[in-house]
Amino acid sequence: MPAIEVTDLSKTYKVPVRESGLRNSVRSLFKREFREVLAVDQVSFEVPEGQLIGFLGPNGAGKSTTLKMLSGLLYPTSGQARVLGHDPRLREEAYRQRIALVMGNRNSLQWDLPVTDSFELQRAIYQVPKVDFVRRRDEFVELLDVGDLITKPIRNLSLGERMKVEVIASLLHAPEVLFLDEPTLGLDVTMQKRLRGFIANYQKESGASIILTSHYMADVEALCDRIIVIHEGTILYDGDIGGLRSKFVSHRLISFGGSDVSEEMVRLSDSVEGSPERTILKVPNDNVAEVASLLLRRGVYDLSIENVPLEDIIDMAFTADDS
């Protein structure tokens, strides 16, 4: 049985409508008008046990709303979801003991308590045996190098530091399903890489099923074998990154030092751009080998053939959907 099963899940918000001005303000006291906003529209997917998937989309696409419904924080308008055999809407204690939700723009730890006391509070809430708690806490603290932070109150930590201890706190009870909403928010490049390694290691060691949202494509490419792209509440793509490239991209980027481009290269390329120091050719996949051969025969230096960046492919998917 899949760890997560989502069938035609939808969420519609009722948003109050009120025009500016005193008269409209008074009228809204007696007769309120609402409009409906469809945040998630009949989304369906499954996540097998032990899989880590990327859940991608622009702001307002429905990613966080979906995760909140799966964790039981929001009640869906229609459709069904099952996580580890539980209905998230019921918010059963047995269910909450088996999952964790980490939101990069939200703080769940006690603002005025030292980090170590917040960890102890998590242990008490989830009734984690002391031996297991100490082992996990010490291991996680060492892996993320936060030993100098655990005696400080949460309020004294930077956004990136809070994110690290939030992730640790969420894993102390060893959740079997983990929802990560922008977990590398506020971290520098070095710490982003360390946290990615930490998440990958936890997933490998525990066999947990993980749904990850992130605007940092390095997170997705490093961690996820499968991605789901959502736009305006609807799934546009569900599959591996290679399949996404094949569906939306028909070219690769060839770059090289200098600006010596022949007419034949221009003919075989969709576009040419760059500077006197470096040139970038946008070449259809069928012409890549021929263009590369031409460049090598001309003795160019510093030649590279690259895929289109993942964030650009995501943008192409959104553009294709809007059209």
Image (cartoon, rainbow, N blue to C red):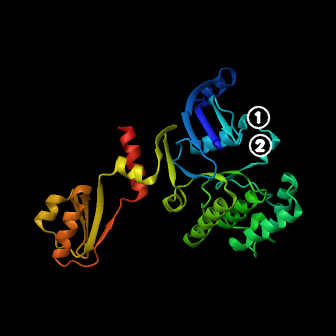
Front position among marks 1 and 2: 2
Which residue appears at 69% of the width and 21% of the height? 30
Q: x, y (%) of residue 272?
A: 22, 62
Q: Nearer the viewer, residue 216 or 283?
A: 283
Q: Which picture quadrant has residue 95?
A: top right
Residue at 65% x, 40% y is 1
Q: Quadrant of the C terminus?
A: top left
Asked if the residue under mark 2 is in contact with the one under mark 1, i.e. CB atoms within 8 Å, the reply is: yes
Q: Position of residue 24 (x, y in %)?
A: 60, 26
Q: Is residue 92 visible?
A: yes
Judge left or right: residue 262 versus residue 125: left
Residue in the picture at 64% in, 56% down:
104
Mark 1 and mark 2: span between their CA atoms? 9 Å
- Residue of label 1: 90
Residue 68 percent across, percent down from the top left: 66, 42
The amino acid marked with disc number 1 is Leu
Judged left or right of residue 6, residue 112 is right
Along the viewing direction, whichever of 151 and 200 lies nearer the viewer: 200
Mark 1: few/some/many CA within 10 Å (<14, 14-19, 20+): few
- Residue labelled with disc 2: 95
Q: Secondary structure at mark 1?
A: helix
Splitting the image into 4 quarters, where does residue 128 fall? bottom right
Q: Secondary structure at mark 2?
A: helix
User: Which residue lies most toward the left here?
Assistant: 263
Mark drawn on residue 178: none
Say what amino acid the circle numbered 2 marks: Tyr
